[in-house]
Image (spheres, helix red, strand yellow):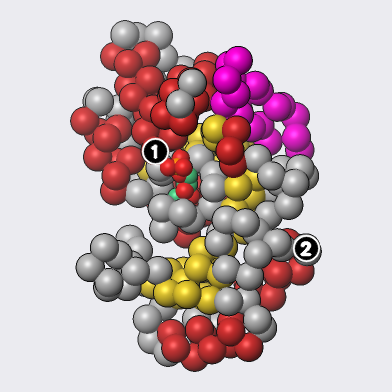
Amino acid sequence: MNQDELKKAVGVKSVDFIQSNSVVGLGTGSTVYFMIEELGRRYQAGEIKNIVGVSTSSRSQKQAEGLGIPMKDLNEVDHIDLTIDGADQIDKNFQGIKGGGAAHLLEKMVATNSHKNIWIVDQSKMADQLGSFPLPIEVIPFGCQKTFDDLAKENLKPEFRLDENGDRVLTHNKNYIIDLKNGVIEHPHILADWLDHQVGIVAHGLFLDIVNTVVVGYDDGPKVIDNIR
Ligand SMILES: O=C(CO)[C@H](O)[C@H](O)COP(=O)(O)O
């Protein structure tokens, strides 16, 4: 199977976890795309009824609305039953890096307001340790060079993320993304704690102790790893 087929297989499989009468967080990315397509299909067929979606990006919002899935803002729901999202890297302790699509602030807010979180990934995302995927940091534009310098002083090898025109990528909230390219992250909790305390950083892509179930796409089919925490 090619990578897209693996992504589709896990996206479709993960919809088995969505129950009728529930509030569902919809992640962002090319793997989640397949999940939303399948959710829309089952919703239209009446196989899943009475759900409300909460999206993590305008892309997912538009896709879900186009499929007729009722959507609400995070402010309009008192809880989310389950969020299904992609990930950029998952280590052997099921800690993750997210934000490759620059949506990790909204994704983290939705994930931390969810009773349960499922990540859907193809096999290439599984790693022993985090870090070969650069760690995305969302920073406010005001004073961002100071924030950048602080990250550089810690030897975290920061680089502003640029688009195809060479302009700084803007997030949903009109912030910038800095990717940290310092390689293997030996102590994710220590780094996350430090980043959480830097003024000017809005959100980092370390998603620690969040996921409950991972669905991994392998050539012989999706494997569900459940009851992680
Ligand atoms: O964190 C994310 C967006 O901010 C995505 O979930 C992550 O980048 C995975 O995307 P894809 O399924 O396209 O590989």
- Position in image of residue 85 (x %, y %): 50, 39
Q: Is residue 185 visible?
A: yes
Q: What residue is rendered at 29% in x and 44% in y?
A: 59
Image coordinates of residue 160 in percent, x first then y, are 42, 74
- Could you say where residue 134 lies in the image, as x and y percent from the top left? 55, 61
Q: Residue at (66%, 32%) from the top-left corner?
A: 213
Residue at the location (64% across, 49% down)? 96
Q: Which residue is mark 1?
A: 30
Q: Please give the name of the residue rendered at 27% of the width and 35% of the height, measured from the top-left corner.
A: 63
Q: Is residue 148 left or right of residue 127?
A: left
Per the image, label 1 sits on a secondary structure element best described as helix
Which of the two residues, 9 or 62, is positioned nearer the viewer here?
Answer: 9
> Is residue 209 in view?
no
- Tell me if the residue at label 1 has its CB under 8 Å from ligand 1: yes
Left or right of 63 in this view: 10: right
Residue at disc 2, secondary structure: loop
Q: Earlier in the sequence, mark 1 or mark 2?
A: 1
Using a 10 Å C-alpha cutoff, classify the residue at mark 1 as few (fewer than 14 neighbours), some (14 to 19) or many (20 or more).
some
* Kind of residue sitting beneath label 2: Glu
The quadrant of the rendering that contains the C terminus is top right
Decide which of 20, 26 is in the foreground and name it: 26
The Cα atoms of the two marked residues, 1 and 2, are separated by: 28 Å
Q: Is residue 212 above or below residue 90?
A: above
The amino acid sitting under disc 1 is Ser
The residue where tag 2 is placed is: 186
Horizontal side, residue 181 vs residue 67: left or right: right
- Residue 225: image x %, image y %? 70, 27
Q: Which residues are magenta?
A: 211-229
Mark on residue 161? none
